[in-house]
Amino acid sequence: MLTRAALEQLDRDDPLAPFRGRFALPPGVVYLDGNSLGPLPRATPGRIAEVVAREWGEGLIRSWNDAGWIDLATRVGDGIAQLVGAAPGSVAVADSTSVNLFKLLGAALTLRPGRRVIVSERDNFPTDLYVAQGLAAFLGGRHAIRLAEPGGVMDAVGDDTAVVMLSHVNYRTGAMHDMAAVTRAAQERGALVLWDLAHSAGAVPVDLSAADADFAVGCGYKFLNGGPGAPAFLYVAPHLHAGLRLPITGWLGHAAPFAFEVEYRPAPGLAQAVVGTPPILSLVPLEVGVGLALEAPLSDVRAKSLRQVALLAALIEQAAPGAFRRVTPDVPARHGSQLCLSHPDAYAVMQALIDQGVIGDFRAPDILRFGITPLTLSYAELWDAAAALGVIMAEGAWRDPRFAVRRAVT
Amino acid sequence: MLTRAALEQLDRDDPLAPFRGRFALPPGVVYLDGNSLGPLPRATPGRIAEVVAREWGEGLIRSWNDAGWIDLATRVGDGIAQLVGAAPGSVAVADSTSVNLFKLLGAALTLRPGRRVIVSERDNFPTDLYVAQGLAAFLGGRHAIRLAEPGGVMDAVGDDTAVVMLSHVNYRTGAMHDMAAVTRAAQERGALVLWDLAHSAGAVPVDLSAADADFAVGCGYKFLNGGPGAPAFLYVAPHLHAGLRLPITGWLGHAAPFAFEVEYRPAPGLAQAVVGTPPILSLVPLEVGVGLALEAPLSDVRAKSLRQVALLAALIEQAAPGAFRRVTPDVPARHGSQLCLSHPDAYAVMQALIDQGVIGDFRAPDILRFGITPLTLSYAELWDAAAALGVIMAEGAWRDPRFAVRRAVT
């Protein structure tokens, strides 16, 4: 039998507890959705205000040089590189995850011209699939997308496979691939491997170099706390830089952008991946978020994350026995930083829970998803979340018709 | 002989004069680079602070619904539509100009499968050329890019031309195309027409509907004053929406993003062009900038712009007779909102001028570019800018070696 007092003791012993104060969180809320939109670092509003008033307002165009805007995308990329086991210069911040997927899938097909299949998983995050579908259609239907069922990726990889595109941690279930093993197996069959780190970067230890991954993309607004719609990032293994040709080639990725030459020449390394002018006012908060993430030892983050996932599962089972089916794998090495439970009326249950100030999210068709963000989440909050859910299930509060109303974003 | 007193009288009679107070401009600066980075609207810092602290910090993930983030990109697009003569729903804000060029060039080639040539101009803004080159290379070299010399566009358009991609106003010279005439002539030869409005939107009257343009892109951080790296926009003529297939298809452009379906289905109209999650903290200042632009009658803006271009040219000739060659066409209907002058040492001259607080920019190889932004620029400032330039030329101040040092951004 778990008690709130026991959880409070864990908070007192938590080496990451001081990070909580570095974030602005509203009172009366237990936030279990940092994997959808990370919370606001306290340092961010002041930094944005300074960039707006001083760098933009007073510096005007001069700030591209004087405030270092011109290098911001690659500078933040180097910070992210440290979080995902990548060499300096091999990560750039640019565009959205979707656009970066397009660039890297395009580059992969160019590198494997004789192979016409993109392998992914049916339950991968849809944008990964949509980008591949759009790309294949644009190329005239000569390429196929082969979607594996969970657990069956390697059965789908063959001599015809140009690239295997997988999410390291599944957005809907929290299941996590063995990155090194899958990469090795796919490369043995001649395929390139592209990892989507949207639910990994800043949340679980990632070592792209050790895994010998070819490509990766990731998201700035989840565990990196970069703010709504923060720019995404992309990784290309250094040994692929020399021959790299991305399908989208723009002026800031030119070797000499301000020479305004007629012919494109790619900038060295991954600087070519910054295609257009980067959104400075969205990059600045990402820099703050990445800086915070770099202060926390990722081994501490992972240890607390695993403990919190296990505790939240146990607390919910204790508060509402048998009400939910656990979807997230129960083996620590096989899941990321979230707990997913299914329920036939998951949408209404989550709305009732949000109404009580416990914010997770719903993922179609039947999943309650609870994101675990060890930098901000206390152990006692897990108790409070489970207790609120227990009351809702005991009283049937989720049957209130107002909780059935679907909103634009779920 | 022009006098400063005469210019001060023009300021007193200027119907746009009140707009100046709506922008924060640093003291001691004459800003002639709003066509590179527009100045900061006074309403922007407060609005950003509110979005950061309240919508992100307190609302957290709920703000996608409650604060209307989910519709922000199309809402701002509808504002821009009014500035460029486009129907509601035919402009979306998304990504960078470069990425939008890629999307629309890709869509154009898909719509004209039998035609393999992209026509543009050699002196178009390089990113337009680079995007076309990257696209053609990615498609395996079956497409060609045909670059016309100034004035020779229609000679380059033939039966083989899929799309004609032109900047409405040239970034380096300020020369402006007759959009309706060029569009009609190109379409008569079966080509689609894509206009880059980077130096037009908010600066000169544009009527995409009347010109029957097929596609357009444009920039958020120049005359729309959306802040450094603000998202760009794209336009697709309504009659092309039904069959439109963009090469990049992402989750937010899906007909039902939160159904998380395996197969992509495009959202109706131009909502499909919002591919990934939009950068909210960069979209919010763009909304402010577009709102301001919508308050000013574009006919007043154009009238003042033409007058200011003519006056600045005359004042500089008066202050430094014969020192520069005018590059911008001298016919009002043939130029945008800038004055470009050439000089063999243009870079050093511009650095010396910036050192005096008169900020224009240099464009390789030999151009001094002065952007005219009628919402913020007074007539008296034109006098001050020309006077400063006159002193620099008379004294040879630009020969100081420190003004020859090339910086990252010129």
Image (cartoon, coloured by chain):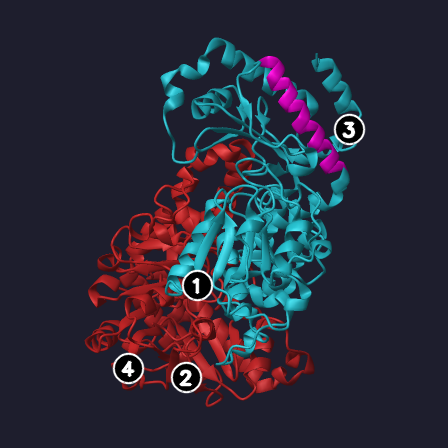
Chain colours: A red, B cyan
Label 3, label 2: how many angstroms apart (C-alpha)?
A: 67 Å
Label 1, label 4: how many angstroms apart (C-alpha)?
A: 24 Å
Disc 1 and disc 2 in contact, CB within 8 angstroms: no
Disc 3 and disc 4 in contact, CB within 8 angstroms: no
Disc 4 and disc 2 in contact, CB within 8 angstroms: no
In the rendered view of the protein, which quadrant contains the C terminus of chain B?
A: top left
Residue placed at 74% from the left, 30% from the top?
B17
The mark found on residue A97 in the picture is 1
Q: Give the amino acid type for the residue marked by disc 3 in the picture.
A: Asp
Residue depth check, mark 3 versus mark 2: number of the one nearer the observer: 3
Q: Earlier in the sequence, mark 1 or mark 4?
A: 1
**Number of numbered callouts drawn:** 4
Classify residue B255 by image quadrant.
Answer: bottom right
The mark found on residue A157 in the picture is 4
Q: Give the amino acid type for the residue marked by disc 2 in the picture.
A: Val
Label 4, label 2: how many angstroms apart (C-alpha)?
A: 26 Å
Dot 2 lies on which element?
loop
The mark found on residue A327 in the picture is 2
Question: Which residue position is annotated with label 3?
Answer: B14
What type of secondary structure mainly makes up the magenta span?
helix
In the image, which residues are magenta? Answer: B300-319
| Chain ID of residue with mark 1 | A
Q: Give the amino acid type for the residue marked by disc 1 in the picture.
A: Thr
Q: Earlier in the sequence, mark 4 or mark 2?
A: 4
